[in-house]
Image (cartoon, rainbow, N blue to C red):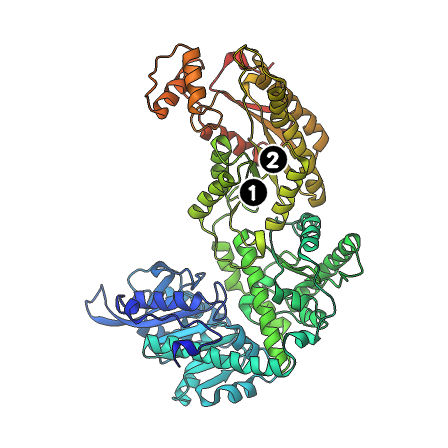
Amino acid sequence: MSNSNYKYVNYLWDDAKAASLDPVGRLVYRSNLLGSDQRITNTGGGNTSSKILEKDPLTGQQVEVLWVKGSGGDLRTSTRENFSSLYQQKLLDLQKLYAARPDKGLKSPAEDDMVGMYTHATFNLNPRASSIDTPLHSFLPGKHVDHMHPNAIIAIAASANREKLTQEIFGGDMAYVPWMRPGFELGLAMQEIAKKNPKVRAIMMGQHGFISWADDDKQCYTDTLNFIERAAAYIEKKYAEKGGDAAAFGGAKYQTLPEEARNALFAAILPWLRGQVSKEKRFIGTVQSDEKILRFVNSKDAPRLAELGTSCPDHFLRTKIKPLYVDWNPQAEDLATLKSKLAAGLEQYRKDYAAYYEKCKHANSPAMRDPNPTVVLIPGLGMIAWGKDKSESRVTAEFYNCAVEVMRGAEAIDQYVALPQQEAFDIEYWLLEEAKLKRMPAEKELARQVIVVIGAGSGIGKETAHRLVKEGAHIVCVDLNADAANATAKEITDKYGLGIGVAGTGLSNCGPSLGLSANITDRASIRKMLDQVALAYGGFDSICVTAGIFVPSDTTGHIPDDKWALTFNINVTGSYLVGDEAAKTWREQGLRGNLVLTTSANAVVAKKGSLAYDTSKAAANHLVRELAIELAPLVRVNGVAPATVVQGSAMFPRDRVIGSLAKYNIPYTNDEATESLVKKLAQFYADRTLTKAPITPADQAEAYFLLVTNRLSKTTGQIITVDGGLHEAFLR
């Protein structure tokens, strides 16, 4: 098949590129190509391998080494470090060890024990943990093996007549193996199939995916694409014959709301919903409202199919046994009704999940996990997915997108069948999965938090944004200057990555940071920004207001009325408006939060030349106390009072620095570099303090960090001074 003949997958192989790589590099290359197309495999799903001859560092002899994508990796983003390497012969020898076990068998202690034996086969001390799928790759005859989770293939694998359909579509090229939990027994079953059917080049894995192999890596890649292409072409032909999109999932029952109305409803309901699903641990949301998901949630069959749950184990590990479908009529019912139906749906979902756990648990099963749904489906609106961070919630959304495509395909060619509950439970609560979860590093201090930093385009705000994200927070960078806000958000994203998730509509298609514009003197602008935060992440936890303005007196020593008003609008009223609007969201969420305002050491020091600024900051000091009372006990409100921060501050452009140097008779030259001028002024201010050290934005950021953590959980209505020790500014 030529490159141009592929309709349902992307053929991306470049012979010249492949020729420039070593064998392991070619494996990584093949893996990245396969992982880059969501129609081939889902994020984090599937694995690839190559059996490569290498020099044994112990013997100097050539040995066959199985390089296979390790546990927890993602094909699209994998590098060499994401692959484990094992002696192929040692893996084969494990079969003898396993055969001697009297307690062997599917889901047996012996089978689970084999996973621990893979480390004994490690080649060259490679630290990457091996995948549970390692036997599948080792025991099949091909030098190169691809195990993928394509929607089109899973649609066949999740059909009632899946074995018959496999034969009909692929003939003798693909064999069939019924659902088996991944592991040693499945590897042995595949090995037997390959031995008995030497012409078979792939195996359909019931309700899971497929695996294919070849002795040439390019051939393996091409075969994988060809199998998926054949499956997709068959499905789409049957789909069209049944009426296509118009008849999908039984046809439409409800109509999609206009985008503006959808966004307004999402913004209104998301913080409340986040509060409901975050009663045990906080979750980050992702909104999906594209045409495909809307076609499903609006359909007549959506309630039936949603209730069945998902098929592929990769899917339900994130999406849980089933989503929460809310039968709300977008054409006839309002927000209050939606909220009521969601509340009832959540209560029933938790009961259903507890019943599923009790029905399926074993004597040694881990304790029941969070019973809240991770996927919520609403007609007219779309889907909301939840995860511990933005990347995970986007992966969850992606996986249910895949599940929808699987159901579409299965219903087009046959009837969709979900994985039996017991089998699903035995994956979800597998002791090996539990052990993997326990090995994961502890979450960072601000994990699962969404923090809005206002004034993040420069100075203290920018430094604070970087300080908080380092501790695991999701950061919304807000500034009057949209370009500056986006620049800070980009710095964060470039440093920490977007994550592996690829789903999300509009603003919700973001990573750990997002840049937004807002004018804090305009209530409507603030509301719009907070609603955008809800659409992006589901809500927020804390707000740090670092935006401020300093307007010097005019040449006569007075401050004009308009400058006085502007100073108070930004430094006082703006903070009040932010707190007042944010309070509406905090109350909807019902989750404890923090508001941190910026005041100043100047608030308690009267001096010439900064009348408006000093007075406004004194008012801000008291605003902290008033808001602390107003928002208690849900929200703690505190302030940070910096002294003069010159370095990195937008309040100190070159002309103001020069004016201050002249004011204090500090020597300088007009052609002197700005950096040098700033350093001189900063040192002058430092020399006035008890600590004799310049105050930097990083010093301030540390105070904001402290106040949004639980380290000072019993502190509210207080001001933390970060001024180097200005005794004139000691709080009275």
Amino acid at dot 2? Asn
Q: Position of residue 45 (x, y in %)?
A: 48, 66
* Mark 1 in CB contact with mark 2 (< 8 angstroms): no
Q: Nearer the viewer, residue 127 or 672?
A: 672
Determine if residue 95 is in view.
no
Give SS at disc 1: strand
Q: Position of residue 110 (x, y in %)?
A: 47, 72
Q: Nearer the viewer, residue 95 or 372?
A: 372
- Quadrant in which the N terminus is drawn: bottom left
Report whether 172 appears left or right of 50. Answer: right
What residue did someone put label 1 on? 516
Give SS at disc 2: loop
Question: How far apart in space, not on screen, are marks 1 and 2 (Cα)?
Answer: 10 Å
Report whether 366 appears left or right of 686. Answer: right
Q: Residue at x 70, y 67 (%)?
A: 298
Q: Residues within 10 Å of mark 2 (few under 14, many from 20)?
A: some
Q: Nearer the viewer, residue 92 or 721?
A: 721
Quadrant assignment, res 688: top left
Quadrant assignment, res 238: bottom right
Q: Which mark is residue 400?
A: none
- Quadrant in which the C terminus is drawn: top right
Q: Residues within 10 Å of mark 1 (few under 14, many from 20)?
A: many
Q: Position of residue 243 (x, y in %)?
A: 65, 80
**Image vertical order of residue 587 relative to residue 689, above or below:** below
**Image vertical order of residue 118 relative to residue 583, above or below:** below
Q: Which mark is residue 519?
A: 2
Amino acid at dot 1? Leu
Q: Nearer the viewer, residue 708 or 420?
A: 708
**Image vertical order of residue 354 relative to residue 708, above or below:** below
Q: Residue at x 54, y 65 (%)?
A: 430
